[in-house]
Image (spheres, grey):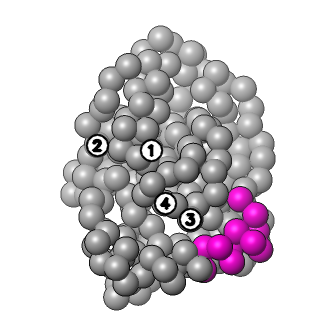
Amino acid sequence: MAILKIATLGHPVLREIARPLSREELSSPDTQRFIDDLIETMIDASGAGLAAPQVYRPVRVCAIWVKDNPRYPYKPNFPLTILVNPELTPLTTDTFLNYEGCLSVPNLRGEAPRVTHLRVRAWDRHGADLDFEVKGLTAGTFQHECDHLDGKVFVDRVVDTRSLTTWADFERYHLAGFAERARAIVAKYGA
């Protein structure tokens, strides 16, 4: 496995709409190696997720895994999940403001509105159908990663630019308040 370079804001690959994969392409050794590398890169960078366009490959694949993540101590754990050609369907109009960061937008955080309850349909890394629901902060993570597949980054979703902050100032001035809000979201919606 290899650690891949992560594209940062300003690189055109982050603004491309990623193309879907066929089951044949998904099953190829090259694509399976790439998925292993995507996971390894996400783990190395302490990400809660990573989308293929973030590592210069504009295909509709992303990885999500939250396991006691030091960058996001308030996020509930979620098992390693690979989404291929995902489709997200909102199951509510309820939203919450999620303080987000991104491996492709180093040292910046901001509040982005996210839907609280989604249906997720996709293939797993082997082409098997996935169909499940996610809520709360986990729903926010899924929306963040799938946005990358449509050429969007979280700063495109930030409504009030006054919420933008460096990581250090987030931890100093905003973490305690957001962690309290996050606990309330988890209590209301679960993982």
Which corner quadrant of the image does residue 134 belong to? Answer: bottom right
Q: Circle 2 sits on which residue? A: 6
Q: Earlier in the sequence, mark 4 or mark 1?
A: 1
Name which residue lies at 38% across and 19% down.
Answer: 1
Q: Residue 50: which numbered mark, if any?
A: 1
Which of discs 1 and 3 lies nearer the camera? The answer is: 3
In space, the residues marked 1 and 2 are separated at their CA atoms by 9 Å
Single out the mark in the foreground, 4 or 2: 4
Whether residue 173 sits left or right of residue 181 in the image: it is left
Badge 2 element: loop
The numbered mark at residue 74 is 3
Q: Secondary structure at mark 4?
A: loop
Question: Would you name the residue on which mark 4 appears?
Answer: 72
Q: Are marks 4 and 3 in contact (CB under 8 Å)?
A: yes
Instruction: Look at the numbered disc 1 and give the secondary structure of its residue.
Output: strand
Residue lying furthest left in this view?
A: 10
Tag 2: amino acid: Ile
Read off the magenta span: 181-191
Q: Is residue 165 left or right of residue 184?
A: left
The alpha-carbon separation of the residues under discs 4 and 2 comes to: 19 Å
Disc on the earlier residue, 4 or 2: 2
Q: Nearer the viewer, residue 55 or 19?
A: 55
Which circle's residue, 1 or 2, is located before the other in the chain? Answer: 2
Marks 1/2 in contact by CB < 8 Å: the verdict is: yes
**What is the three-letter code of the residue carrying label 4?**
Tyr
Going from N to C along the chain, the mark reached first, 1 or 3, is: 1
Q: Position of residue 63 (x, y in %)?
A: 52, 40
